[in-house]
Amino acid sequence: MKKTMALIRRNLLIYFKNRQSVFFSLLTSILVFGLYLLFLKGNYVSALNDVVDHNPGLKGLITDGDINAFSNMIMLVGVLGSALITVPFHCLSTAVNDRERKIDYDISATPIKRWQIVVSYFASAAISSIIMTGVILSLGLIVLKAMGGLYLSATGIAAAYGVIVLGSVSGTAFFMPIILLYKDGSSLGAFFGIISAVSGFVIGAYIPLSEFSESIRNVCGLFPGAHITSLLRVSLVGDVLDKMDTQIAGLDGGMFVSAIKSVFPFETYAFGRDFDAKLMVIYVVGVIALCIALMIPIYAKNYKRK
């Protein structure tokens, strides 16, 4: 166990000491935040205001503060969802760098077992993701609280941190078998560029998945990141919508909140059906189990002792 912990510590130090690595692992999240400030927030606020304006009975019940709080939470969900993809991926690149520089020969030559080496890469990437996304969530909640636009219960906050842990583990597990197939950092970097470009669309950070066709939504729903983002939406945005619904007091028969949920779904569409929170958790856990079962034999085949 001490050997495994030593390798985990070593991998964590490699990631956190490399400032460029940390920055690039958060680049997609920074882009999501930048796009939100430039025009996404304006689009969300404008769309919600139009709904209120076209329903005179809602005026005075749905305030500008409610709309801003909703938009800010949607932004925070997008930033977290993208970070839960790119941070574990970037930290796992240590395995490929070790292979390229033949450091894996030295590690494999030690008495430590293969599964312990794999676990050290896996655990360090998951821990890095938990730390980084946990910090982002904490800072986001503090800023929103200071702005006076935080409508979130203790249960919602606890659930959000729980989803962060699940998302970190699932993101690491999902990418680990893929990354172990790469032999050099340049090809992995090219693949990371593709992941960075498409991840925001897969989780609905740029455009809500409801805007895509059914077939595209089906494909996006195969990735655990889409389910994790929906779970974050449930935990972070649900209380804001509940507050709005309470203020409306049933005057619209719940149609306002239902319309919002149809655009920013709290469920994930996959395999031709909608997954609720329980099914999303089950699916993500299943993906984790499958990927963990695959990563040990893949490592044993591609990282041979010399």
Image (tube, rainbow, N blue to C red):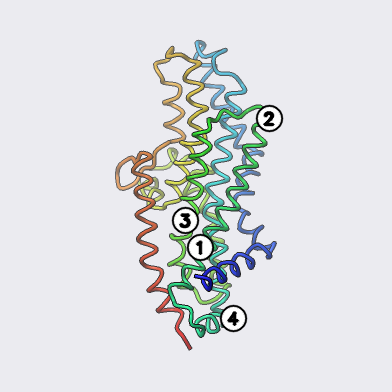
Q: Who comes first in sequence, dot 3 or dot 4? A: 4
Secondary structure beneath dot 1 equals helix
Q: Amino acid at mark 2?
A: Met
Q: Is residue 287 left or right of residue 107?
A: left
Secondary structure beneath dot 4 equals loop
- Tell me the CA gap for discs 3 and 2: 32 Å
- Tell me the CA gap for discs 1 and 4: 22 Å
Point 63% across, 64% down: residue: 15
Give the x, y percent position of residue 296.
40, 71
Residue that mark 3 sits on: 169
**What mark, if any, has residue 123 been given in the picture?**
1
Q: Residues within 10 Å of mark 3 (few under 14, many from 20)?
A: many
Taking depth in this image into account, of 28 and 7 the one nearest to the observer is 7
Hey, which residue is sitting farthest bottom in the picture?
306
Secondary structure beneath dot 3 equals helix
Q: Who comes first in sequence, dot 1 or dot 3? A: 1
Taking depth in this image into account, of 184 and 109 the one nearest to the observer is 109
Mark nearest the camera among 1 and 4 is 1
Q: Who comes first in sequence, dot 3 or dot 2? A: 2
- Tell me the CA gap for discs 3 and 4: 27 Å
Residue that mark 4 sits on: 101
Q: Who comes first in sequence, dot 2 or dot 1? A: 1
- Tell me the CA gap for discs 1 and 3: 8 Å
Give the x, y percent position of residue 268.
39, 42
Point 49% across, 64% down: residue: 122
Mark nearest the camera among 2 and 1 is 1
Point 53% across, 37% down: residue: 157
Mark nearest the camera among 3 and 4 is 3
